[in-house]
Image (tube, grey):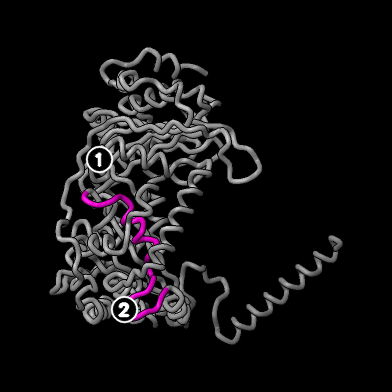
Amino acid sequence: MSGKKITRLVSTAVAKRSATLRYYSSTNKINIDTPLSKPLPGISVVKGDTKFDSHSKTQVTKLSNGLTVASEDHWGQFATLGVLVNSGSRNEVAYLGGINHFLEKLAYSSTDKFQGKQEISTLLEKYGGICDCQSSRDTMIHAISLQKAGLDTAVEILSEVVLRPCFTEEEVEQSRQAIDFELETLSMNPNKEIQMMELIHAAAYRQNTLGLPKMCPPENLPIINRDLLFTYLKHQCTFDEMVIAGSGMHHEELVELAEKYFTRSPSWSNMQLDTQYRKDKSYAQYTGGLATVNEDLSNVSLGPTPMPELAHVCLAMESCSHQHEDFVAYCVLNALMGGGGSFSAGGPGKGMYTRLYKNVLNRHFWIENATAFNHSYADSGLFIFYGSAHPHRLADLTAVLSAEFKRMTEKIDKADLARAKRQLQSMLMMNLESRPIIFEDIGRQVLSSGHRKQPLYFYDAIERITESDVRNVATKLFNSPVSVSALGTLNMLPDSHVIKSMMNLDKPSLASRLLYNRR
């Protein structure tokens, strides 16, 4: 198209728009020069629904049977709701590890009323709905998102799935096969973050609570059965350990539906089950220690393209629980350290200006990954450095990470701290624009504390964090023994006493200092 023709088209469009404005102005007696910041003369101002003023406040109701209902109303045609149970792999100390992994795979199977996943999916599809179940070390979550018109159906499905599952032998066997396939896929995946998080928790909380395996150990796959699953549910899945949370509905409606469907006794209440088990109420005991898996990863790949052989190491120390006064400071410290893979950049907390990028990945070309994590639970927490490099550089990688661990206690650049706080605040507010995340935030906070703190509370708490606060929590980390995990060809992994020396804040390792100054 020629330049003259484009000019004629643009001129025609401008002329038509000017004519439209002149017509609208002449017929409605409106000055077209009125700025957008002011209402047009003669046009009434639309007022919002004053009945919706309380939508930003989480309402909490406790039913007579001990069940808690929490929700917030929001504009829109869809809602997200679900059931959170204060139960996870940490509660399996008296059982075979992997029960919660099985329960996750068995979710939305047959119940007293529904024949199976197909019938449940068909019901939800009428309202554009989807369902999901996720288990973690401390929480089991069943969630549904759908149109608001299907709330009654959603709450009924949740009550059946959580309180009245059937767990047929066929369904248990299908879940067993699914878990076996998942474990095999993980072993072939070059990304070893999931396995490393398992190992570092096992090292930090040796043989207790948070150190128990989240993934079902292969040796337990053929042993876990229907009776054991119901026995676990009978003791851990009780009304006083549950929260029904919702985002996008009237609170009174959700309470009414909870009373309608969640007052019947669970299906396992009348079963003859093993009586030797009791409800687990144990506290996390941080021990520190070493957990390693010596494995040849030279042929690990999900496709025909070979991947570089890597060895992986984690260094960790105890931080704090999510209810502790230092929790926000540890979150800021985590954002300050940031990190990621050698090719990843961008995103809150992962930018090229975080310390693990500037001081580690940018200085040591042979390091493939250096990332900081902060895991917080009801009674403990874990601050972790995770790194990957070729197996023959494993000793150097450990030294570099330990040196950077200790540098957290030193002076912090003002611009770095301000950037970390802004990144954390933006990530907080951006995530909470999503309805499913709001639902999970409501449920987790109410389950752990009985109420929900609004996002602005945490935004302001982040803003108040100072350099002194961050350095103080970094120093507190060294009050606990170090935890170490490693995976891969580990011939070059330093001995545990050498790693402890590297992580000694009072006696800095000469090797660590020399390695850190390499370019």
Q: Is residue 12 left or right of residue 387?
A: right
In x, y percent, where is residue 187? 49, 43
Relative to residue 408, is residue 272 depicted above or below? Answer: below
Q: Secondary structure at mark 1?
A: loop
Query: Quarter-wise, where is residue 148 in the image?
Result: bottom left
Residue drawn at point x = 45 percent, y = 58 percent: 177
Relative to residue 405, is residue 95 depicted above or below? Answer: below
Amino acid under label 1? Gln
Residue drawn at point x = 28 percent, y = 54 percent: 88
Residue sitting at the far left? 64
Residue drawn at point x = 25 percent, y = 79 percent: 261
- Magenta region, residue range: 94-116
Q: Nearer the viewer, residue 148 or 412?
A: 148
In x, y percent, where is residue 360? 47, 27
Q: Residues within 10 Å of mark 1 (few under 14, many from 20)?
A: some
Residue drawn at point x = 32 percent, y = 68 percent: 82
Q: Nearer the viewer, residue 30 or 20?
A: 20
Of marks 2 and 1, which one's residue comes earlier in the chain?
Answer: 2
The Cα–Cα distance between marks 2 and 1, rounded to whole angstroms, is: 37 Å
Q: Secondary structure at mark 2?
A: loop
Quickly name the residue at label 2: 112
Q: How many marks?
A: 2
Query: Quarter-wise, where is residue 328 in the image?
Result: top left
Quickly name the residue at label 1: 207
Asked whether 102 falls inside the magenta stretch, the response is: yes
Quadrant containing the N terminus is: bottom right
In x, y percent, where is residue 386? 41, 35
Residue sitting at the far bottom? 27
Relative to residue 231, is residue 196 depicted above or below? Answer: above
Amino acid under label 2? Asp
